Image (cartoon, rainbow, N blue to C red):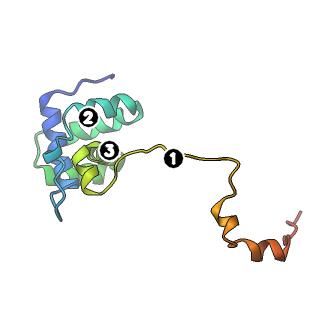
Amino acid sequence: MSQTIDEEMRATFLAVADLLIPEALGMPSASQVNVAGPVLDRILALRPDLQEPFFRGLRMAAGKDPKFAAQAVNRDDPKALAAIGLVAASAYYMDPRVRGLIGYPGQEKRIYDPDATPEYIANGMLQKVIDRGPIYRLTPR
């Protein structure tokens, strides 16, 4: 990473992330799943394009009341707040507990047989279209 994340930046990020992702309806808040932990470093390493606006937004919000800081960042630099929000949401949904609560097990292997007839053809859904034949309009020149 081009920039390091000190504890003050992590705390600022966590405070803003908690505003964006509060505890609600049985779901934990951003801080309850530690979005500012090691997962933050991983996300910023995977998405170097987010680093500059992310850090810019955190510098603008540092040392201020999180609610007013987030409003000011959104007003003055919406791209920075968008980067903070995307990083927060990414870290949040990478947490196994959150994925379990929303019923998402993660990516799973699916068996695909390229020689099998697709269900949408086998069940007759497309038969009306096949029977109708090709219909098209020439585009104007």
Find residue 72 and report its horizontal and vertical position in percent.
22, 51
Find residue 127 and report its horizontal and vertical position in percent.
75, 73
The residue nearer to you, when weighing 30 against 75, is 30
Q: For residue 90, which numbered disc appears in the image?
A: 3
Q: Secondary structure at mark 1?
A: loop
The residue nearer to you, when weighing 87 against 32, is 32
Instruction: Work out whether 5 lies above or below 98.
Output: above
Instruction: Work out whether 100 lies above or below 109.
Output: below
Q: For residue 110, which numbered disc appears in the image?
A: 1
Which class describes the residues within 10 Å of circle 3: few (<14), some (14-19), or many (20+)?
some
Does label 1 or label 2 sit earlier along the sequence?
Answer: 2
Which class describes the residues within 10 Å of circle 2: few (<14), some (14-19), or many (20+)?
many
Residue at image mark 2: 40
Name the residue type under label 2: Leu
Please tell me in which quadrant of the rendered image residue 59 appears: top left
Does label 1 or label 3 sit earlier along the sequence?
Answer: 3
Instruction: Answer with left or right where residue 13 lies relative to residue 51.
Output: left
The residue drawn where x is 34% and y is 43% is: 83
Q: Secondary structure at mark 3?
A: helix
Please tell me in which quadrant of the rendered image residue 139 appears: bottom right
Q: CA distance from mark 1 to mark 2?
A: 30 Å
Name the residue type under label 3: Ser
Q: CA distance from mark 3 to mark 2?
A: 9 Å
